[in-house]
Each structure stands twice: as C-alpha cells, then as structure tokens.
Amino acid sequence: MHRFANPTRFLKVARPLTPWLFWAGLAIAGFALFAGLTMTPADYLQGESVRIMYVHVPAAWLGMAGWSAILVASVVQLVWRHPLAGIAGRAVAAPGAMFTAICLVTGSIWGRPTWGAWWVWDGRLTSMLVLLFLYFAYIALAAASEERATTSRAAAIFGVLGAINLPIIHYSVTWWNSLHQAQSITLQGSTIAGSILWPLPIAVLGFSLIFAAIVLMRMRGLIADIRIEARLKRLAAA
Amino acid sequence: MKAKHQRLTLALIAIAAVIGAGFLALAGLRDNAALFRTPSELALEPVPPGQNIRLGGMVEDGSIRQLPDGITITFTVEDGDASVPVRFSGITPDLFQENSGVVAEGAFDPRGVFVADNILAKHDENYMPPPLEDMAQADDSAS
C-alpha cells in the first residue's frame, strides 16, 4: 500500500493505465448498450422502456460505489495521512455526482410511462436525491477549504458522515413500503429473466472502467495543480 | 499508543456510529417515510374522510369496472387481509391492471369509498420477456 503513497510512483502507474481503462470501458459499455438495445427481448409489462436499466443500474451502482470510495479515502486520509487519499476522494466526487444524476434522470424517464409519474417522494428516490446533494456539498467543501486537498480534513470528516446515507438507500425499498420495486438481484439470485439480464453485468463492468479512468485522470490533474502551486510558491520565495 | 493507532480507533468508532445512526434513522422514520398505507393498516387506524393519504396494495382480480360516463372507473385495492373500494376519474398508467400493485392518491368520501385524484402503477421486481417468446428464449440461453 505505502509503495503508492509517493505521487511520482503513482503517476508512473496511472499514466499508462488511464487510456487502457478508458478505451476498454468505452468498448465494453458500448457493446453492452448495443446488446441491450438490439439483442434482448422487451419486458412483458414494461415493453421497450425496460432497456433504460442498462444505463440506470450501472449509474446507481457507481453513484453508491463513489461514496463508498470517498468513505475509504477519507478514513485513509484521516488515519494514515496518506498524501494521495485526499486527492482520490476529491477525484471521485465529480464522476460520482455525475452518475448519481444520470441514475435520477434515467429513473425519472422510466417512471413516467411505468408508474405514471416523473417523480414521487418515495424512500429510494428521495435518499438518492440526498446522495446527489451530499456530493455537491462534498465538492463545495473540498474546493472551499484553504488548505490543499491532501490536508483538508473538513472534507474527509464530511465524507465519513455522508456515508450514513448508504445503508438508507440500500434498505429504503425493503424497510419502507415504496413505489420503487424491491431488489431484483440479490445474493439468492435474480428475478430478471436471463435473456434480459445478460448485458447488465457487462454494462456495469464497462461503466465502472470508465469511472476508474475518469478518477485517474482527475487525480493526475489535481497532482499537477498541487505541483504548479508548489513551484510558484518556490519562485515567489526566491 | 501511537498517534496513528489512536486515529484509527477514532475513525472506526466514527464509522460504527455513522452506520448505527443510519439504521436508527431508518427505524425512526419507518412509519413516516412509508409512501403509502395498506388497507389492513387503514382498517386498524382509520383516517377521517377528506384527509389526503396514499393508499397502496394490489388491484383485486375482476374488480375493475367502468362507469357509464366513460372516464370513471371503480376497483378494489386489497392486501390479503383487508380491502378498500376506490373510484377514479382520469387516465390510468399503462401498467395499471388487475392483480398488480397500485398506489392511489386521494381521500375517503363520507361513505367510505376512496376517491383517487391520481393513480400510480407499482412495478414489481420481476422482469421477463412476453410469455410467447419465453420458451424460445429459454432454449437460446440453454444452448
């Protein structure tokens, strides 16, 4: 773990890895979406609108995985003072917010023909909207602190506190009666027919690789920012 | 105790507290955060006529009737133990049908009929192709 604490060593790995992750993710997600649009049957009730799930489910997973990553990065930053952890947390926030927004928008588009409403103040929908606002708050907090990302502890503490919402999102459909359907895919199996399900894990993999590529790009950008600032400070001091 | 270990302990306590708070919030909001009330909940705790609530349950088999005016329908919402008669004027969602989930927004009239202003269809967690294609698809995935 500590081998990658050094930003220089991290960059040596991240730089060649970024394009591989990005193009592989794009190809895999593209294939999954193509398969989802042309190679799977429509649902017996929802009809063609079922295909929105090939974007909606990966986006929901990445929105929640994003905050889980912020939680881990925040803990590593607070406990080990790892210089890259704060940068990683900040890098995850933007794509996390983006995928959460995609999840809400696609869900809304699906909800109109299926439920008969664009939006309902249901436990799952509301807690997901709260997650989007938590991302906005985290981004604002990380940007507003005067210290650099590596030392900004306010954002890290907020990253830990915000994780309170993750179990709420997950259990919102089991604990409260809600309009959003219960989990289709559980450890016991899936209630989605195999012929409809198969492109979904491929789409999840593809979008996750794109997510990882965006995070690495943003981490490199943030490291470059910090180095520019340090160099300017040295020049000003000289 | 090294400073690092102290911070680790504090962080672990903080995470445990946060997760605990999440579950407490879930349990505390349990009644208030419910989107709708079921017929059996309403049988135990009736609401006065005119008070707006959401009623949720299954549309009883064979209960949907169209009234002569052409836009008003009546049906029964049940949850296995109790049932509530519902009247609604307007366009229902495509997925609104008998033996499937529904959430109706509205209020009871003095005679105990639930008058809905809006109907939402609830989709369940089952996804499958149309029945006719089902067998062909099963063959495909088996081969």
Image (tube, coloured by chain):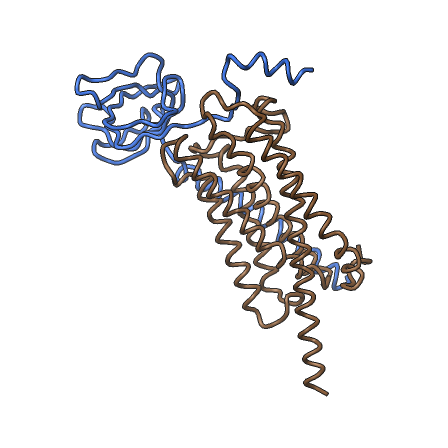
Vertical placement of A66 versus B138: above or below? Answer: below
Quadrant position of residue B38? top left
Farthest residue in the right direction?
Answer: A3
Residue A9, image quadrant: bottom right
Residue B136 x, y percent position in the rendering: 59, 13
Q: Is residue A166 left or right of residue B37?
A: right
Q: What residue is drawn where x is 65% and y is 47%?
A: A210
Identify the residue shown where x is 19% and y is 28%. Answer: B109
Relative to A74, residue A169 above or below: above
The reply, left or right, for residue A13 in relation to residue B65 is right
Quarter assignment of residue B4:
bottom right
Tell me the quadrant of the picture where the C terminus of chain A can be found.
bottom right
**How many numbered marks, from 0 up?**
0
Judge whether A95 appears above or below B122 on screen: below
Q: Where is residue B87 shown, x and y percent of the image?
A: 24, 24
- Residue B131 x, y percent position in the rendering: 50, 14
Question: Between residues A24 and A111, which one lies in front from this camera angle?
Answer: A24
Percent coordinates x, y for residue A130 in the rendering: 47, 49
Q: In this view, does B26 lie to the left or right of B71?
A: right
Which colour represents chain B? Answer: blue
Task: Please state, as top left, top right, bottom left or bottom right, where the N terminus of chain A lies in the image.
Answer: bottom right
- The chain letter of the brown chain reads A
Along the line of sight, the residue nearer the viewer: B15 or A3: A3
